[in-house]
Image: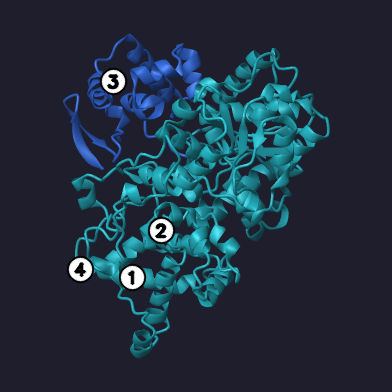
Chain colours: A cyan, B blue
Amino acid sequence: MKRKMKIEDFGRPARQLVTLEPSDLLPLPPPYDEPRPLKQLSEEQRERYEASLDGFVGIGITKPASAKEEEEFVRKFLSGLKKLLSKENNWTFLQPLVHSLDYCVKCQLCNDSCPAYVASGKQEIYRPTFRPEILRRIINKYLKKESGILRKLTASDIDLNFTLLARLAELAYRCSLCRRCAQVCPLGIDNALISREIRKLFSQEMGIAVRELHEQGTVQQLKVGSSTGITPKALANIIAFMEDDIEEKMGRRIEIPVDKEGADMLLLHNAGEFLAWPENPEAFAILLDAAGISWTLSSEIAGYDAVNYGIWYDDVQAARVAIHHAEAARRLKVKKICVGECGHSHKAMLVIADRILTGDLNIPRESALPLLADLVCNGKIKLDPKRNDFPVTLHDPCNMVRLMGIVEPQRKIVRAICPQFREMEPHGVENYCCGGGSGFAIMQSMNFPDWRNNVSARMKMKQILEAFGDVPDPAQKKYVCAPCSNCKGLLRDLIEYHGAWEKSGIFYGGLVELIVNAMTDLKKPFIEWEWH
Amino acid sequence: MAKVTLGGIEIEIDEDGFIQEPDKWNKEVAEDLAKAEKAYPMGEDHWKLVNYLRDYYLKYEIAPPVRMLVKQTGLDLKKIYELFPGGPAKGACKIAGLPKPTGCV
């Protein structure tokens, strides 16, 4: 049962503010329509971590041991909030933050654009305008010291305590930063940016961040070279394996260039590809070799891992990682950096880094998608679309498509080489997030994956099933093409959770794999369906 | 984080059951982990996989790509899921005492 929820309730003591009922969730088409129970935390976990928002844990904030600790928590938050609203401390995002806080007219037009809000059965707390309103009220009362009478008259009071702030921090991790809400807003209010700025305040000022993004993410990346833990030594081993694998499929060996000084471009892959989907960097190597392009990988710290989780939660970490990427390119004296199939790295390197990289670190940076479209559509590689004669749909990664407007290159490719290509609805800049954006796909602890599979990814599941609605037979293999490592990780888990391979023959993979699969001089099919 | 007794020794594990002190891993620890992962009793193929993962980890401080694992052990993915219902990462790696996979994998 959904309870009426008011912002005033947000800081009130309660074991759990909101309980999601499987029967309230957005219905999926059969045979996926049976409500499934949601994974509950153990009592011990509830005791240890703050889970009183919705019973799910993304961050795992530990509760304060004393009243003094709680006071200190609130004080630190308010001091951080002051910094967040000052030019000296937030030169990166102050303007859009203040614009979004000050000018939202609360028309609520954005609500129905949010996949998590709609898929949850319209739970009040997931509304895109809910968290910004909490922040606004805190600012008005505690920083602007608005009078109590005014707050009463406008019914906008709020009382700060640990519980409210811990819930707010968790709630900032129920928004995947897809920015669909910002797209439909007539005033350009970016409520996703506010989610991200809340995460930033907690990380930079209070040391509270999701472990997978911080300790195991950016910190590990800057220390050993990659958020996956791949060291330069392990990278060399995996590349040798990839070269063997290519030889087996192509009948000839291709050397994968590493640290080749003076190459035209440095190709940055999300290092998740090397571990989970080595066929993706293999396919890139095959295509770039066939097209005679001068390129290289880097084996420098962070130079072989395009990820920059900092853009999801912390400006300082984001800047550190971006500088490492640019330095790897500068040392190799390449003319440009090309970002492979990784959505958030497109945002980090091609958009955000413009505010970070200066002087000779400001090396030209491009997306791989237009380059791939050129290879496919201008006859630079011999392709036979008949090799891809199975139903294919295309998932649009939010950062490439909605944020950057890279819409057509990937479509030109699949239209040219996939005879059974069909769009999902809606698509292009109006796409839905896979449900794994902003770190959700890699947040694998406790019961968070269950929230993701059932709520944030639910709209995507529905879209995929509808796109293949005319071919329900599981014997007919189908391919969801997602040119983004993070989206692929999400899709893999989502397909497994719903048993969609067994029930519907749905598989997933990247874009370059489809291109190489269509190459005429390949000895055997490149796409191997048995990896479902 | 919590401490549990595995193979007769006290070991710290994370919220998802991965051991946090890889140096304490031994065969008895692995067998106790396997019980929780529905991979017990462990036969020859279980050990083949676990030992492969363990050796790779000691050499490279990371788990190998699943494709490499399949190729070099000769056990296909279906067989791996039969042996370790949790799959290669959440099942086999956990039993081999490797840390939980991180990053976009």
How many C-alpha atoms fall within 10 Å of the one at disc 4: few (<14), some, or many (≥20)? few
Q: CA distance from mark 3 to mark 2?
A: 41 Å
* Residue A159 picture location, percent across and down: 30, 75
Q: Earlier in the sequence, mark 2 or mark 1?
A: 1
Q: CA distance from mark 4 to mark 1?
A: 26 Å
How many C-alpha atoms fall within 10 Å of the one at disc 3: few (<14), some, or many (≥20)? many
Residue at the spot of label 4: A67
Residue at the spot of label 2: A122
Residue at the spot of label 3: B39
Residue at disc 2, secondary structure: loop
Residue at the spot of label 1: A6
Q: Nearer the viewer, residue A353 or A445?
A: A445
Residue at disc 3, secondary structure: loop
Q: CA distance from mark 4 to mark 2?
A: 35 Å
Same chain for the residues under marks 4 and 2 in the image: yes
Residue B12 location, quadrant: top left
Q: Earlier in the sequence, mark 4 or mark 2?
A: 4
- Numbered disc 3: what chain? B
